[in-house]
């Protein structure tokens, strides 16, 4: 859910920025930027490429403003929006996330690029819950588990 909120914020901010810069089709470019934001690490780059290419056809000044807008939006999203909406989301090590994206894209192409990170999160939680907690008997926490238990979710932590 937090990823969806961050994607919508990126789409709205990008659309507004592209409209202010004067790029053609700011709504489509903003939608592309928001949808591409789903892919961790590389998504913002993929989302910025169409806007940058179109800005280059308008003028060099528009291209410069587009680069600055994309950088500013990604800083706002990464340092303000996402931390606010993702307080109880899984904390996976960044190196593991990047590794999952690279391996997923090498093995499965575009689908691996899109689903590499979510699958790594699932594997990470399964290892923590099934192996570390159940097999080794060590106490470990999974972010979001406490909140689910307090909300009355049936899978209470052990």
Image (tube, rainbow, N blue to C red):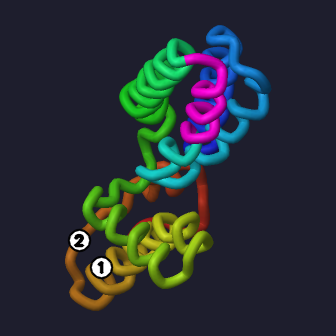
Residue neighbourhood size for the residue with mark 1, other residues' Cα within 10 Å, grouped as few (<14), some (14–19), many (≥20): some
Residue to which mark 2 is pinned: 139
Quadrant for residue 102, please give it: bottom left
Tag 1, which secondary structure? helix
- In the depicted view, which residue is nearer to us: 152 or 144? 144
The answer to whether 99 is drawn above or below residue 57 in the figure is below
For this orientation, the residue located farthest to the bottom is 135
Question: Is 56 placed above or below 152 here?
Answer: above
One can see residue 132 in this view: yes
Helix, strand or loop: magenta stretch: helix
Name the residue carrying label 1: 133
Q: Position of residue 83 (x, y in %)?
A: 41, 34
The residue closer to the viewer here, 121 or 64, is 64
Q: Position of residue 134 (x, y in %)?
A: 33, 85
Which residue is drawn at the image coordinates 58% and 27% (left, top)? 56
Label pair 2/1, CB-CB below 8 angstroms: yes
Q: Quadrant of residue 27?
A: top right
Magenta highlight range: 48-59
Q: Secondary structure at mark 2?
A: loop
Q: Does the magenta-highlighted stretch encompass residue 68?
A: no
The image shows residue 46, relative to residue 16, as above or below, that is below
Q: Is residue 132 above or below residue 23?
A: below
Please count the marks in the image. 2
Task: Give 105 or 89, whichever is nearer the viewer.
Answer: 105
- Residue 139, image x, y percentages: 23, 71
> Residue at 46% of width from left, 65% of height from top?
117
């Amino acid at each position: 859910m937090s990823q969806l909120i961050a994607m919508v914020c990126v789409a709205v901010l990008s659309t507004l920025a592209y409209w202010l810069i004067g790029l053609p089709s700011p709504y489509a470019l903003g939608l592309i930027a928001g949808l591409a934001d789903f892919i961790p690490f590389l998504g913002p780059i993929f989302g910025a490429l169409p806007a940058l290419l179109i800005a280059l056809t308008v003028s060099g000044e528009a291209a410069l403003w587009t680069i600055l807008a994309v950088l500013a939006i990604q800083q706002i999203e990464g340092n303000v929006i996402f931390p606010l909406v993702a307080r109880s989301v899984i904390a996976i090590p960044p190196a593991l996330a990047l590794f999952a994206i690279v391996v997923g894209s090498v093995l499965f192409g575009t689908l691996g690029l899109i689903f590499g990170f979510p699958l790594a999160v699932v594997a990470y939680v399964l290892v923590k819950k099934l192996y570390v907690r159940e097999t080794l008997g060590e106490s470990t926490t999974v972010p979001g588990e406490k909140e689910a238990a307090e909300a009355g979710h049936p899978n209470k932590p052990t």
